[in-house]
Amino acid sequence: MKKKCEKKGVEKEREKREERKQSSSLQSCHNGAHDVSVTDCFAKAGSRPPHCHCCKKDSTRPIRVGCEEGGPVHLDG
């Protein structure tokens, strides 16, 4: 019984660390200074591997940049 309780405590601590990491990374998101060119790709309906067919849509829009340790690691837009 004791080992099971210890394991749950370790798992809870790990979850808390992960939550802190996620919340701290959310604080380091910034709006991009300029709109950027973006290409979105979509699989066409009925397309299946290995013969996938895709279509693309080009656009220009603002993005958000997520940073960790001073460097960009994630783009949203």
Image (tube, rainbow, N blue to C red):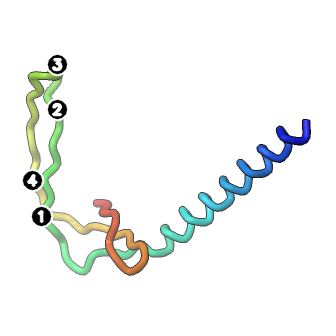
In the displayed structure image, the side of residue 72 where residue 13 appears, left or right: right
Task: Assess whether mark 2 and mark 1 are in contact (beta carbons under 8 angstroms).
Answer: no
- Quarter of the image containing the C terminus? bottom left
Q: Given the image, on which type of amino acid does mark 3 rest?
A: Gly
54 lies left or right of 1: left
- In the image as oriented, which residue stretches furthest toward the right? 1
Q: CA distance from mark 1 to mark 2?
A: 20 Å
Residue 56 in the image, given as x and y percentages of width and height:
9, 43
Q: Is residue 66 above or below residue 76?
A: below
Residue at 34 percent across and 76 percent down: it is 71
**In the rendered structure, which disc, 1 or 4, sits on the residue that comes first in sequence?**
1
- Read off the residue under disc 4: 58
Q: Which mark is residue 27?
A: none
Question: Disc 1, disc 3: CB below 8 Å?
Answer: no
| Residues under numbered marks 1 and 4 in contact, where contact means CB atoms less than 8 Å apart | yes
Q: Is residue 61 above or below residue 49?
A: below
Callout 3: helix, strand or loop? Answer: loop
Q: CA distance from mark 3 to mark 4?
A: 22 Å
Residue located 34% across and 63% down the image: 74
**Marked residue nearer the N-terminal end (1 or 2):** 1
Q: Position of residue 9 (x, y in %)?
A: 79, 50
Name the residue tied to disc 1.
Answer: 37
Mark 4 and mark 2 lie on one chain; the one further toward the N terminus is 2
User: Of 8 and 22, which appears nearest the observer?
Assistant: 8
**Which residue is at 38% across, 69% downward?**
66
User: In which quadrant is the N terminus drawn?
Assistant: top right
Q: Disc 4 versus disc 2: distance between alpha carbons?
A: 15 Å
Is 54 drawn above or below residue 75 in the view shown? above
Identify the residue under disc 3.
Answer: 46
